[in-house]
Image (tube, rainbow, N blue to C red):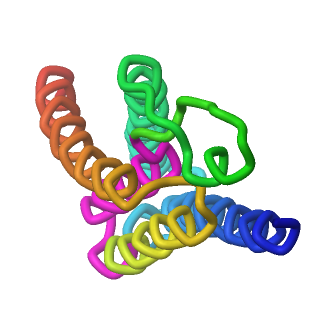
Amino acid sequence: MAVLVSFSKIFGILSDFLLVLEIILIFVFIFKSKKFSYSSPKSPCSVRTSLYWLTFFFITFSSAFLLASLLKFLLPFPRPLNLIEGKILYDSFPSRHTLIASSLAFSSFSLNYKLGILNIFFAILIGLFRILGLYHWPQDVLAGFLLGFILSLLIKEIYKIKRNEHS
């Protein structure tokens, strides 16, 4: 039992690390990309563009977190590891890590195609690690991935509308 819990913690740490890495890559791309440095790093145009993308990803992250939290409250399912340990905690569905990672990953395609591909790979690994770590059932991860995709499309459309209103 102790070995199982240890492996579970390792996979939990790996999934946390990949999610943080995904967020760091987005930040690095926003601030270091030649696409956003028009004349100088301090030019108003590049600052405005960077702020646009920062708020876009902040809204994506926050929406994913809130959606996952709401669904966990409304649809209580036990976690696999909790059933093995004898604890019954009903917060498995959907996988919050996977929902956040996939929504950020699909949204990052708007920023850069290669970044999007890399982040999708990270999101898939995060989902796999959440299953292997016995934090989630496969359907929790699949739902998180699909909801992340849908949420990213919705936020992109809303953000386009709001940006066009203020242009």
Q: Position of residue 87 (x, y in %)?
A: 71, 37
Residue 159 drawn above or below residue 4: above
Which is more toward the observer, 153 or 134? Answer: 134
Which quadrant of the rendered structure holds the N terminus?
A: bottom right
Q: Is residue 108 magenta?
A: yes
Based on the picture, tell me whether residue 97 belongs to the magenta stretch.
yes
Q: Residue at x 52, y 51 (%)?
A: 97
Total count of labels? 0
Does any portion of residue 44 appear in the rendered image?
Answer: no
Residue 73 shown left or right of residue 86 in the figure: left
Magenta stretch prevailing secondary structure: helix
Along the line of sight, which residue is nearer the eye, 12 or 26?
A: 12
Q: Which residues are magenta?
A: 94-115
Q: Name the one closer to the observer, 145 or 46.
A: 145
Residue 39 x, y percent position in the rendering: 46, 63
Q: Residue at x 47, y 48 (%)?
A: 50
